[in-house]
Structures are given as C-alpha cells and as structure tokens.
Amino acid sequence: MTRTIVITGASDGIGAASAKQLAQLGEEVVVVGRNPDKTARVARALGVDSFVADFSDLAQVRELAASLLERYPRIDVLANNAGGVFGDRTVTRDGMELTFQVNHLAPFLLTNLLLDRLRESRASVIQTSSAAARFPGFDVDDLQAERRHSSTSAYGHAKLANVLFTKELHRRFGDQGLSAVAFHPGVIASSFGSTSNGPWKWLYGGPLAQRLMTSTSVGGARLTWLALGKPGVDWQPGGFYANNKPARTNRLADDPVVAKQLWERSAVLAGVEG
C-alpha cells in the first residue's frame, strides 16, 4: 500500500534528497518548504504535492496543518525535518527566540495539530535532531535563551528538545499506535548554517569542510530508512539513531521529568492543549 509521507524542510538538503528517494520508490510524498520557488521546483521534478510554510511564523504552521488535514485522509509518516542554526538572538513575530521556534516549537505545534490524524493512521513521527543535542546547559526555565545565548547553545538545546519531544510523544501515545523516533543525519554538505555566524558558518561554508562532509543523499537515506522502516522491528520507538543504529545523546534526554516539563511549557507557548 502506498503511504502518505509528509517531509518538512524538503526544499533542499536531506529533506529534498529523502523526498526524491521515497518518490522513486512509489510513496506519496508531500514536500513542505519555506522558499516558494525552491519548494515548487523540488515538487515539480518529483511530480508530488507541495506546501509552503515558514516556521518562524506559527500562523503559517497552523495553515499548513489545516491544509494537510483537508487534503490527506491518512498521514503515515510525518518527518519534522525543517530547522536551522542562526546568528544573533532574534525574536519572531510570535515573541519566541528564532532557533527554538523553528527547530522545536513549530514542529511541536504541527505534530499536535495533526495528532488525531496521525493516531488514526498509526503513523511514524520522525524528528531530525543532531549530535549537537549533547551541548550542555539546557534549561527548561530558559527556553527562550533570554539569560544566555549563542548560536551554538541555542541550536544544541533545540536539538535536545527534539529528542525530549520524541520520547514524551512515545510515552504519551505509543500505546495508541503512534511511533516516534529522532535521528542525527550526519554533518551534511548543504546550505545549512549559511544564516549563522562564527564556527557554524566556517564549518559549513568552507570548500575543505564541504569535501569532508556527508552528502545530502547519504543523510537523506538515513531519513528514508526510518520512513520506510517498521517501528519495533527496524527501529525502536522513542529511540535516537545515528548511522541507522541506536546512539547515545545528552543524558537529559532520558529524564522523563524534563521531557514532561518541556511538553507542558511548549503546549502553553504554542497554544495547544497540554
């Protein structure tokens, strides 16, 4: 049976690579991106549907969810892949720190708005996290990085939030048929980091670094492996993966109290039922 697979952040990078791989295998892929031209170009090349949503604006996330619910009676896989690392601390029109909103709060909101459809479909929810989740200093009382901010810490903490969200999603809804997993795609040779400064811009922008990085097709294949895999057989729900294998991450990722606190505070910020 052909499955409906929604991939955010699919206008380039590993999202676009995975969308291509899955479409070539006959799956019904839905491409979501921030840039209208790039998103349309990817979708047109694959002959699939596309939607545009900028995750720095939660109203657009709500519009995206409404459109997906109207269009698709089933959503078998939701890949929360959109994200990025940014420079100086910036506040969105929603009043949130940009890195936190784009990487965590927006996908948290999207998943919650689609939750009934995802449960009905016994879906897999995949979070593109990062090995940067190990960055120390995560503070559930300072999610907006008002006390202390750097592009590195903000990104690392948002990626840890992805893993905590995954584990809490599994705890809350795993017995209802929903399967959640997070993964590190590798250090990918893409435009990622181009909007940042300091070490991130150097790491992703230099020609030597690009040659040493993992290709988008390989990183995309790791997302594709999870999307195609059978939960409980190929991968374990609630887990964190790297190179298609279970991996260790920040010790806080296994703290159910922190995960519950993050969920409850995210629900308040996103305006959804906690």
Image: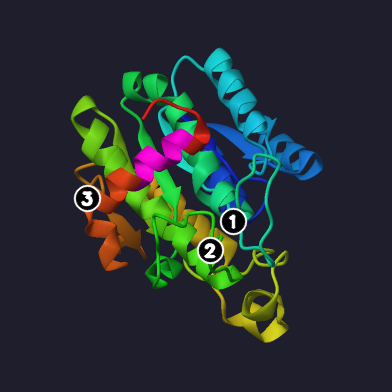
Q: Residue at x 46, y 39 (%)?
A: 108
As drawn, which residue projects farthest toward the front?
147
User: How would you classify the magenta stretch by its main secondary structure?
Assistant: helix
Residue type beneath disc 3: Pro
Q: Position of residue 247 (x, y in %)?
A: 28, 66
**Mark closer to the chain start, 2 or 3:** 2
Residue type beneath disc 1: Thr
The quarter of the picture where the N terminus appears is top left
Q: Position of residue 207 (x, y in %)?
A: 71, 82
Determine crowd level at label 3: few under 14, some 14-19, many 20+ residues with C-alpha closer than 10 A. Answer: some
Determine crowd level at label 2: few under 14, some 14-19, many 20+ residues with C-alpha closer than 10 A. Answer: many
Question: Relative to 93, is 75 on the left or the right?
Answer: left
Residue 184 appears in view:
no
Question: Relative to 51, is 108 on the left or the right?
Answer: left
Q: Residue at x 46, y 57 (%)?
A: 142
Marks 2/1: CA–CA distance: 6 Å
